[in-house]
Amino acid sequence: MAPWTRCRSTSWSGRSRSSACWAGCSPRSRYWPCWSPSRCGGARTRSPVRSCCAWAWGCVPCSAVISSNSARSRAWRPSPGWRAGSPSPAWRCRGSIRCAGSRRVRRCRTRRRSCSPWPPPGSSWCYWPAGSRCDRCAPPRPRSCCVAEVSYELDRIGVDYPTPAGLVTGLHEVSIAVPGSGITVFAGPSGSGKSTLLRVLGLFERPARGTMRFQGTETGTLTHRGRRALRRDRLGLVFQNPPENLLDYLTVADNLHAAAQSARRRCEPGDILGRLGLGGTGSWPIAALSGGQQQRLAFGCALARGSSVILADEPTSQLDEASADLVLDTLRSLAEQGFAVLVASHDERLIALGTRVAWLRDGKLEAFG
Ligand SMILES: Nc1ncnc2c1ncn2[C@@H]1O[C@H](COP(=O)(O)OP(=O)(O)OP(=O)(O)O)[C@@H](O)[C@H]1O
């Protein structure tokens, strides 16, 4: 077994490997599997993390890589004490190019386990050639390929809540087809089921009855993990309370980075902030933004995640009029950019802004148009 040596890389020293590896490393993970001090520094620092992830997921023992067609991997030498074929931390795989030819490595690549969300974008940390397999580093998908004509198709959706007094029906047989662009407002008095419907659309709530298709995918049969993946990759969520949407211990730009990373993407904060009218605030703490600006940034986070559908629950209800105006501008601009924005609200200005309005009452859809 190869000796574990503390990584001496300046960029990584002091960082625990567990923070670098989201695949979940062993307790030994505070130590890099550096098998040669000369390999542990500068540009090579990425390999231990890759090997850490690959090893943690048990992808390929070193022998497979060394016997692969890659000239570079063949040129590598194992550390003293390492035994060929052992799925030990002394893993040698250094990247997809070097591993080309090994089927087992390809399995690893497909699972994308090695694409650590750390460090932040901009530090060229992707192991995969951009655009081939790694979503995170691929250029943003053109809008045309991710905008569906119909984002949601609901057929007789019903939601029940168990309460001490018996079942309360939150939604009664709601059938609706929501287009894949523009602003759709769910309006109605308090208790009419707006938030319940939004939770169903956001894949948080499993309806008791009926079927729902989201961008062509039947959601009723999805596992919890499948629903989460769909939410992560395609949905942006903005809650009522501005601070709930943001991480207040990060700066504005870091919030955008974190949002992009959660969807395994990269983002250009300056670009997004410019589009939201928040240019120049990248280094500000969240507390320095007004409520309206925070809410705008929350929509920016949805943009950073590459979401094609944005769901917002009463985004203006906690804001004063001037701040609410900023949010309305943002919604208008998102709709113009081709996003499907679905909002639950009883704010009359927001209802007036909607491309279409679905009226709910007592959990029933009264009108849509
Ligand atoms: N967790 C829950 N447990 C029990 N009943 C619930 C729950 N959530 C919602 N309901 C009931 O479902 C119905 C619809 O509630 P919902 O919150 O969706 O309405 P809403 O239109 O969003 O109201 P508001 O504008 O006040 O937020 C209400 O009768 C409510 O009492």
Image (tube, grey):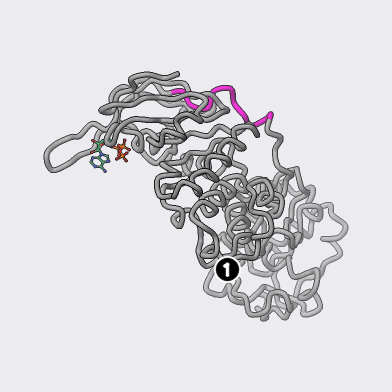
Q: Is residue 216 visible?
A: no
Q: Quadrant of ligand 1?
A: top left
Q: Position of residue 166 (x, y in %)?
A: 14, 36
Give residue 126's position: percent from left, percent from top: 73, 56
User: Image height check: is 113 above or below 45?
Assistant: above
Residue at x 59% of width, y 33% of height: 335
Q: Residue 219's spot in the image, x, y percent? A: 44, 31
Extent of the magenta region:
144-153
- In the picture, the quarter occupied by the N terminus is bottom right
Question: Residue flagged by tag 1: what amino acid is it?
Answer: Ser
Q: Find residue 118 and report its image quarter.
A: bottom right
Question: Where, by quadrant of the figure, is residue 36 drawn?
Answer: bottom right
Q: Is residue 180 above or below residue 24?
A: above
Q: Which residue is mark 1?
A: 19
Camera-side residue of 201 and 124: 201
* The stretch drawn in magenta includes residue 95: no
Residue at the image position 37 percent from the left and 35 percent from the top: 346
Residue displayed at 68% across by 59% down: 280
Dot 1 lies on which element?
helix
Left or right, residue 254 beside residue 47: left
Q: Does the magenta portion include 152?
A: yes
Image check: 256 left or right of 311? right
